[in-house]
Image: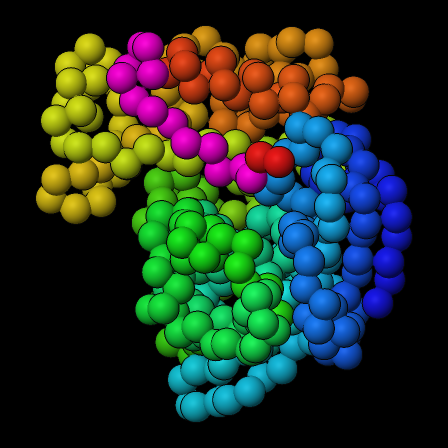
Amino acid sequence: MIIENNKDLKELNSFGVSAICDTYITLESDEDLGLFLRSPKDHFILGEGSNVLFTQDFQGTIVTVALDDLIEIKHTDDHVWLKVGAGYNWHELVMHCIKKDFGGLENLSLIPGTVGASPIQNIGAYGVEIMDLIAEVNTYNLSDGRPEIFSAAACEFSYRDSIFKNRLKDQYLISHVTFTLTKRNHQTNISYEPLAKAIAQQQISNPTIREISDAVIKIRQSKLPDPASLGNAGSFFKNPIVSMEDALRIRHEYPSLKTYPIDDAHVKLPAAWLIDQCGWKGSRRGDAGVHERHALVLVNYGNASGSEIYQLSEDILQSVLRKFGIQLEREVNVL
């Protein structure tokens, strides 16, 4: 276990904003977990900091779970169950699966963060959500240190949400996640329009999981800035799910609005389009801004504070509410 006091988190969050925490603990083994859980304290669990915005110094303890083991725990002719440590880098896991020809994660290529964060956020992209691939989540109850296993159903997954982000927020530490992946007869998904177009442009009729991954990476790199060169946390806001009536109301005035069906009564709207219509794309306030190629991405051009980025996001929320009557929600965890 590595313990550091008065740790600057600037290099540990993808926005690159400076914030000092009282204590920073890195858990590198099961033994470290045991020691930590025997003396639980108020804390925040941080992965790679790719979905968090620090708006002030953190008065307390921040914990990083650095377990990065990967085990194929079960095989059938068609499937493999992969148990992965919470500290394993997400994109490296996807690339490992592509190399092994394990199907399911390819649409989620190049998403920043760690495996442990994936069920909390129910990460998703290009027509795929991780809830459909998770078999179970290994956790520890932070109140008493007991290990508990959550089935996929027990995780209460919904769009960019889970029991760990909602009802049981900050009550459990995730140590491992087990995924069910295909070994053959992969059920590839190219339903998302930009991905389907990218595949069609290559004149590929039956894309492999590697070809889908390559296309996703190319699309993401063309739209989203690399946090290593420009501080950001990817999509800052959720795409709102609204009633059919609300969608028709907006489309009556804005016929170009695209909608994505959820059920008979609800559709998902592109938050980027709503924000762009309010004139925010490419705007900048000092070093806090909205990316010029993607209105969902708030960026730090150098020395923006977390509070400046937060205020920008608040002004965007209010302008979308005024113009469209739609309340956006932040994806990013604000501290």
- Residue at 66% of width from left, 28% of height from top? 55
The count of marks equals: 0
Question: Is residue 324 highlighted in magenta?
Answer: yes
In the image, residue 205 sits, relative to residue 318, either above or below, namely below
Q: Position of residue 280 (x, y in %)?
A: 49, 12
In the image, residue 22 sits, relative to residue 297, either above or below, namely below
- Residue at 22% of width from left, 45% of height from top? 262
Question: Is residue 265 highlighted in magenta?
Answer: no
Q: Position of residue 177 (x, y in %)?
A: 54, 70
Secondary structure mostly seen in the magenta stretch: loop
- Residue at 49% of width from left, 13% of height from top? 315
**Is 218 on the left-hand or right-hand side of 167?**
right
**In the picture, which quadrant includes the C terminus?**
top right
Instruction: From the viewer's side, name the closer residue of 78 and 124.
Output: 124
Where residue 233 sits, quadrant-wise, is: top right
Q: Position of residue 110 (x, y in %)?
A: 60, 50
Instruction: From the viewer's side, name the closer residue of 89 and 162.
Output: 162
Q: Identify the magenta region.
A: 321-333
Where residue 78 sits, quadrant-wise, is: bottom left
